Image: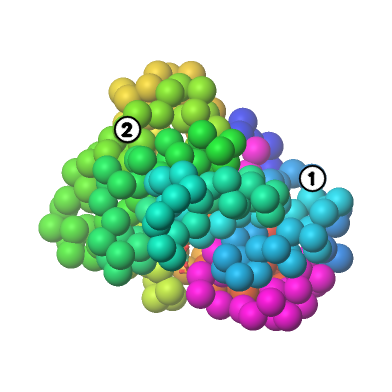
Amino acid sequence: MNKQRKLIIAGNWKMNKTVAESLALVRGLKIELANIKEVDIVICPPFTALSEVSKAVIDSNIRLGAQNMSENGYGAFTGEIAGGMLKEFSCRYVILGHSERRQFQKESDELISKKAQAAHANSLKPIVCVGETLAEREGNKTEQVLETQVKGSLAGLTKEQMVETVVAYEPVWAIGTGKTATTAQAQEAHAFIRKQLVGLFDENVAKRVRIQYGGSVKPANARELMEQPDVDGALVGGASLDARSFCVFIKNSI
Ligand code: PGA
């Protein structure tokens, strides 16, 4: 598949995998994915596994990401993790504003934008998640929600930073439910997000930003999703926990 933007496929392991399980998964991924050059491959293990996994992926084509970080630098913030700490483990990416954090930790667009700025200050590329709930979709509010989240979560980023930011469109109703958005629904939302980026930044920035789709993606729907002109990769939850399904997903995407 010849796309203008390089595909980026990231595995979001969420709160799963011990260190030993993480290493076993990485072993499988390294063997299966060694020859893949067409896709930026990212895995986002839990914080507790970052140290060991970072050593295991040295000299591979697998890049490391974290699932969250603090908007603050070092200091008196009990239980938080600073961007600088993630850099110690060679993290290149960090997922921000996942819908589970928006829902359970009450993260706001304003907080997510501060985290995105802190990520860039530490040379981490944020993967900023946006997406509507089922009630919002059924109430015809999808565009309104996406507009608000895109504008709010990406506020304060420079054009240069935006180009190095990934946006993940994850309809909340499709996450972990086995219900994927149709390719038409995904493309429509991605095109809408890109249009917002034109307004907030400019045409050139919007053309370069990669927008991932997330929500019950699996090997069987990889190709048709990646064929959509504005879909530039995927944020994979459940299907990234198993080496075979994540590898087949990536191979089916190219
Ligand atoms: P899922 O999760 O693939 O298990 O639906 C995606 C995500 O939450 O990033």
Q: Which residue is depicted at the point 48% across and 19% down?
A: 204
Query: What span is colored magenta in the figure?
Result: 6-29
Q: Residue 155's x, y, as percent?
A: 32, 32
Q: Amino acid at mark 1?
A: Lys
Q: Which mark is residue 243?
A: none
Which residue position is annotated with label 1? 37
Q: Nearer the viewer, residue 105 or 30?
A: 105
Residue 125 magenta-drawn? no
- Closer mark to the observer between disc 2 and disc 1: 2
**In terms of secondary structure, where does tag 1 sit?**
loop
Q: Is residue 215 left or right of residue 26?
A: left
Q: Which residue is depicted at the point 35% across and 40% down?
A: 113
Please identify the quarter of the rendering in which residue 176 is found: bottom left
Q: Nearer the viewer, residue 191 or 92?
A: 92
* Residue 207 showing in the rendered view: no
Few, some or many residues within 10 Å of mark 2 (<14, 14–19, 20+): some
Q: Is residue 215 left or right of residue 122?
A: left
Which numbered disc, 2 or 1, marks the residue that appears first in the sequence?
Answer: 1
Q: Nearer the viewer, residue 84 or 25?
A: 84
Mark 2 touching mark 1, by CB under 8 A? Answer: no
Few, some or many residues within 10 Å of mark 1 (<14, 14–19, 20+): few
Q: Residue 142's x, y, as percent?
A: 23, 50
Vertical side of 58 occupied by 209: above or below: above
Vertical side of 193 occupied by 24: above or below: below
Q: Amino acid at mark 2?
A: Ala
Which residue position is annotated with label 2? 155
Residue found at the far left of this picture: 139
**In terms of secondary structure, where does tag 2 sit?**
loop
Q: Which residue is depicted at the point 40% across and 55% down?
A: 76
